[in-house]
Image: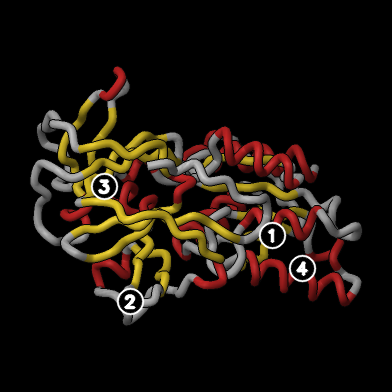
Amino acid sequence: MDTKILLENGTNELEILEFVLDGNSYGINVAKIREIITYQEVTPVPNSHPSIEGIFMPRDVMITAIDLKNCLQRGQSQPGGLFIITNFNKLDIAFHVDHVCGIHRVSWRDIIKPGATVSTTEDSISTGIIKMKDKLIIILDFEKIITDISPETGLKITEIDELGVRERNDVPILIAEDSPLLNKMIVDSLKKAGYHNLIHTENGQEAWDTICSFKERGTIEKHVGCVITDIEMPLMDGHRLTKLIKDDDELKNIPVVIFSSLVNDDMRRKGESLGADAQLSKPEIGNLVKEIDRLVL
């Protein structure tokens, strides 16, 4: 299946691949997908997490296979079906699914926040829900799934300690990140690095509304000296937020740092075309601080 559908930059749209497990529909952002292949026999890894089926080596590249059915507490997958091979946070991971249905182009504004609509298990690893005519597609939080299985793949907070003693800095920084856990971790890391004048928002729309409010009051320079944004967020994504800032003559000189699990070669080119001043993958919290230092000091 062709997963390389091109989207115009900054349109606030994404492509979702719909796949099925146990008759239920789930989704993954196409930007995370490298390829989709038929199931291959895997080699079990001794003493590994129960959701890890094993490893296999297509084209001499070792890839870990994850049993999504096990992650969703729906039992164990049997041989067969498909592997969705992904790349995010600089990791190549295969997710075992029953079959795929197709690709849907949607706006971030049309994605519903998870809540009572889905089960407790799915709610904890869901970033949103797409309501189609006759069904719901639950978008899974693949970063959280991987971090739960292997915590060392998450933000490397210890990198802040390696920066040594830091002086307190008053530069105002606005953060747009929809994950409450990651939002808190980024805030805590920046405070540890000396940046204490922080505003944290839950998505690009909230960040943009906050920026516009300061702009209308004529206090933008006092309140926003740098913006850090995720890419995948409900209502407005980070690329759209970047475009709005960089297309505004009064705001375009504000440094924008994209900090996302989706920063690969294709996404980097997209971010550059929108005017992003720096782009980093989410585990690199130490490099995030270094880039902020470069941009604001």
Q: What residue type is labelled 4?
A: Ile
Q: Mark 2 points at which residue?
A: 134
Q: Name the residue under label 1.
A: 241
> Please, what secondary structure does the residue beneath circle 3 have?
helix
Q: Which amino acid does label 3 sit on?
A: Ile
Neighbourhood count class around disc 2 (C-alpha, 10 Å): few under 14, some 14–19, many 20 upward: few
Image vertical order of residue 116 relative to residue 80, above or below: below
Q: Nearer the viewer, mark 2 or mark 3?
A: 2
Mark 1 or 3, nearer chain start: 3
Q: What residue is rendered at 86% in x and 61% in y?
A: 221
Q: Which of marks 2 and 1 is in front?
A: 2
Q: Mark 4 points at which residue?
A: 211
- Rendered image: mark on residue 149: 3
Q: What residue is rendered at 32% in x and 80% in y?
A: 117
Mark 2 or 1, nearer chain start: 2
Mark 2 or 3, nearer chain start: 2
Q: Residue furthest bottom?
A: 116
